[in-house]
Image: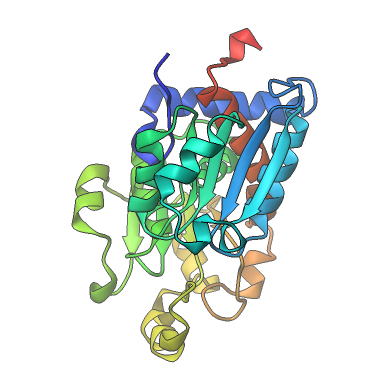
Amino acid sequence: MTTRHFLRDDDLSPVEQAEVLELAALLKAEPLKHQVLAGPRAVAVLFDKPSTRTRVSFSVGIAQLGGYPLVIDAGSSQLGRGEPIEDTTRVLERQVAAIVWRTFEQGRIEKMAAVSTVPVVNALTDDFHPCQILADLQTVRERKGELAGLTMTYLGDGANNMAHSYLLGGATAGMHVRIGTPEAYQPKPEFLADAKAAAEGADVLVTDTWVSRGQEDEKSERASVFEPYALDEAALALGAEDAIVLHCLPAYRGKEIAAAVIDGPRSAVWDEAENRLHAQKALLVYLLGYRKDSL
């Protein structure tokens, strides 16, 4: 069987994405029933970047599937000391069922997948955050039902990994995706072309922090540029009457999102954070070859 990887949002076809979201709903309803990693089989979870939600959700999810989360801070491993990615991968693949990696350049995880005989999952790179988008789509699906035809508006840095993943993941789900961003922060043209999405109205309003890791020196400049794109009460009022609000966290109230919005009745942020657990479990189950009717 061909090894499946999940390196960017459109690595799943529309049908496959829908199947993963169906699995996520099942696993959320029956969190401890489907122990496909019983043994326990290990899943390596590597971190080049700090993490809260990714670390917690993958660790808990792997354990709930009956497996062992082998969490590795790459900086303290040989990988962090310059060992070739391919060598680390060949060691890991003989001992784990899958590899999850939160790293920097997209090319790093692509190198890993190119030689890995077990599934490789992108837990965040500079270009994409596809596991977050699966959780977001699960959250919207719970609140709105079908995803196809809904309009999702992202406000903020259009050149970051979240914007790229919303374009690709939203388009895969049949949604219309709108990116509200200054001219100098447009998404990468190749990802925009891949998404081929349009937008009219807003059923889902999304934002993210204006300052990502490595951009701390641009904090003041970014705050000035992105201030008109804040998801505040005025922005929320422009959406549909039943629009919901998402934020992948961490959030900075009074900056990219107003406290009254993230903590208000239209916020689905805490469901969204929980759904990282269920969506990622479903993704692992799917990549390991299981389907809803075979569980």
Residue at position x 60%, y 15% from top?
292
- The spot of residue 29 in percent (x, y) is 75, 27
Q: Is residue 94 left or right of residue 151?
A: right
| Quadrant of the drawing holding the N terminus | top left
The outermost residue toward the top is: 294
Nearest the viewer among 254 and 48 is: 48
Q: Quadrant of residue 195?
A: top left
Above or below, 252 against 279 in this view is below
Nearest the viewer among 155 and 16 is: 16
State the colouring used for the structure image: rainbow
- The spot of residue 276 in percent (x, y) is 63, 45
The outermost residue toward the right is: 32
Q: Is residue 247 left or right of residue 56?
A: left
- How many labels were placed on the picture? 0
Q: Quadrant of residue 8?
A: top left
- The spot of residue 80 in percent (x, y) is 52, 61
Q: Is residue 174 left or right of residue 230?
A: left
Residue at position x 29%, y 71% from top?
185
Above or below, 180 against 15 in this view is below
Residue at position x 53%, y 27% from top?
20
State whether residue 174 appears in this view: no
- The spot of residue 153 in percent (x, y) is 40, 56
| Quadrant of the drawing holding the C terminus | top right
Nearest the viewer among 68 and 250 is: 68
State whether residue 195 appears in this view: yes
